[in-house]
Amino acid sequence: MNLFKKLLPTKNGIVGSQKYCRATFCSILHSAVDHSVEVHSSDQEVVIALGSNVGDRLNNFNQALQLMRKSGIHITRHGCLYETAPAYVTDQPQFLNSAVRAVTKLGPHELLGVLKTIERNMGRSGGIRYGPRPIDLDILFYGKYQIGSDILTVPHERIWERPFVMAPLMDLLGSVIDSDTVACWHSLSTDSDGLFGLWEKLGGESLIGKEGMKRVLPIRNHLWEWSKKTSVMGILNLTPDSFSDGGKFVSVQNAVSHVRSMISGGADIIDIGAQSTRPMASRISAEQELDRLIPVLEAVLEMPEMEEKLVSVDTFYSDVASEAVNKGAHLINDVSAGQLDPNMLKMVASLDVPYIAMHMRGDPTTMQSSDNLQYSDVCSQVASELFSRVKDAELSGVPAWRIILDPGIGFSKKTEHNLDILTGLPVIRSEIAKRSLAASHAPLLIGPSRKRFLGEICNRPAAGERDPATIASVTAGIFGGANIVRVHNVRDNVDAVKVCDAMLKEMSIQL
C-alpha cells in the first residue's frame, strides 16, 4: 500500500519545521519497490553526491557528470572538490568527494535507476560494502520529498554522520535560504538549526585542511591544496603597449630570460599575456594574439626550470584558450569572465583546466567610462556580479572546483574602489557566500601590481616606481584572504608573501 502525505509544520518537529519551511511543505513517500510512487511532470531539484577512489578519480567524476547530463539530469551547481580519508573500511585508497545540484523530470526511482546504470557502466560491481569503487552516486535530496522504499531512502540515511558528504552538500547552498525547496532540505535534517547547525556540530570549516579532509583544485595531474600557502604569479607581457613593461619581452629570447629570472625569484605560476588590457587598449584578433603567444609559450614550457611550475595564459578569446591548453598551458586567466567571447565558457568546460574569472564591466576601451564606474557598494556589487559569472560558468559545464576568482583591481574601478576591495576581500567572500558557499570558498587572486591607483596615492607616475606600494597592497590582500598574488616584481613580493604567511600561521597556532 502506498502512502503519500504532506508533512505540515509541527510545533516541535524538525521535518517541516516552521523555521525553515515557511509557507511551503515537505512531502513523504513510502512504498514498496513494485508499487512505488513516482513524481512526474514538473522539474524536481535534486542533490547527488559523488565519490571515487579507484583509477583516475577526477576523470571518473568528469565521465559521470557527462553521463548524467545525457540522461536528463541538468546540473546547475557543483560543490568544491575534497580529498578524504576512507570511512568504515579504512584499508583502501583516499577518496575524491563532491556533490552537485541538478534539475530533472525523472521520478525518484527512475533517477536511482539511471545513477545505478552509470555506476555499472563505469565498472562498479558489488564488492565490499563501503569498499573501493570507481564511482559512487547517491541521491541526497529529491525536491521537497522524504522518500522511503525497499531500495531508496531520501534524504540519504547516513548524510548526517559523514563530513565528506556534508561538506560538499553545504557548498551547494547559500548562507541565505533562497527557495522553499532549500528550506525543506534544512527541515529534513536531524538538527533543529537545519543543515547549518548540523554541519557546525560535526566540526564545520574547522575540519577542512585536516589530514582526513582537504579542499583541493585539480591542476596539472595533481590536486592542489591551494590554501596552504599564498602563491605568487609572475607577469609576462608579450605586448608592445602594456602599461608597465610593454615591448620589453616580445622576443622569445627576452621572454625566456625574464621567466628564468621570475622562477629564480620564487614564482609559482607564470601568467603569459599577448593582448593588452590596459585602459583604452586596442583589441587585436585571436590570430594576432596567437602569433605573439605560441612561440613564447612553447619555449617557456620547454624550460627545465618550469618542471614544477604552472603556466597560465591571459586571454578572453576561446580560440586562444583552446590552442594554449593544447600546447600545454595549465590555466586560463580571463579578464572578462566569459563576457567578451560567447564561446569561452563552453570551451573552458571542454578543456578541463582551472579558470580564473575576473570582474570587469565592459571591455578595456569602456571599462573606465562613467557608467561602468558607478557603485553604491563596490564590494557587494563586485561579489554579486562575480557570482553571476560563476553561475554562467557552472551552467556551461565548468565545475566550481575549477574556478578561481579575481575581483578585478584596476578594472572598472576608481582609486577608492580599489582600496575598498583590498580591505574588503572578506566582505566579498561573505557576500558571495549568501548565494553560493562553493564560490565563496574558491581561491581568490588579486592583481594590484604597479596599477595606476598606486601611482596616484604615492605620486609615482612611472609604473616601475610602484613596487613598494605593490608590496603594501599585496600584504593587505593576503591578510584579507587572497590566495594568489599576480605581480611584476616577483623577488620582492615573494619575500612579502613569506612574511605574511608566517604571520598568519603563527596567528592560527595562537587561536
Image (cartoon, rainbow, N blue to C red):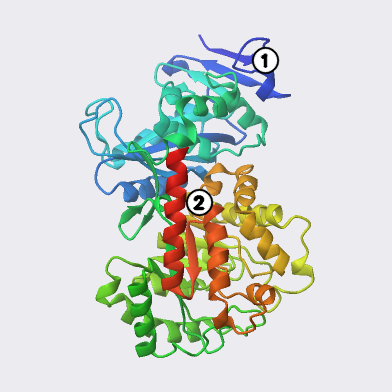
Q: Earlier in the sequence, mark 2 or mark 1?
A: 1
**Vertical arrangement, residue 175 with respect to residue 403, above or below:** above
Residue 330: x percent and y percent?
Answer: 38, 66
Which amino acid lies under the numbered mark 2 shown in the image of this protein?
Ala
Residue 322: x percent and y percent?
Answer: 43, 71
Name which quarter of the figure residue 430 lies in: top right
Q: Residue at x 44, y 25 (%)?
A: 159
For the residues labelled 2 and 1, the Cα–Cα distance comes to 37 Å
Name which quarter of the figure residue 193 lies in: top right
- Judged from the image, the secondary structure of the residue bearing numbered disc 2 is loop
Labels 2, 1: front one: 2
Badge 2 crowding class, 10 Å Cα cut-off, few under 14, some 14 to 19, many 20 or more, is many
Badge 1 crowding class, 10 Å Cα cut-off, few under 14, some 14 to 19, many 20 or more, is some
Which amino acid lies under the numbered mark 1 shown in the image of this protein?
Leu
**Vertical arrangement, residue 486 with respect to residue 193, above or below:** below
Closer to the camera in the image, 46 or 84: 84
Residue 233: x percent and y percent?
Answer: 44, 68
Q: Residue at x 37, y 46 (%)?
A: 61
Residue 405 in sight from this viewpoint: no
**Which residue position holds label 1?**
8
Residue 409: x percent and y percent?
Answer: 62, 66
**Which residue position holds label 2?**
442
Q: Residue at x 54, y 17 (%)?
A: 29
Name which quarter of the figure residue 465 lies in: bottom right
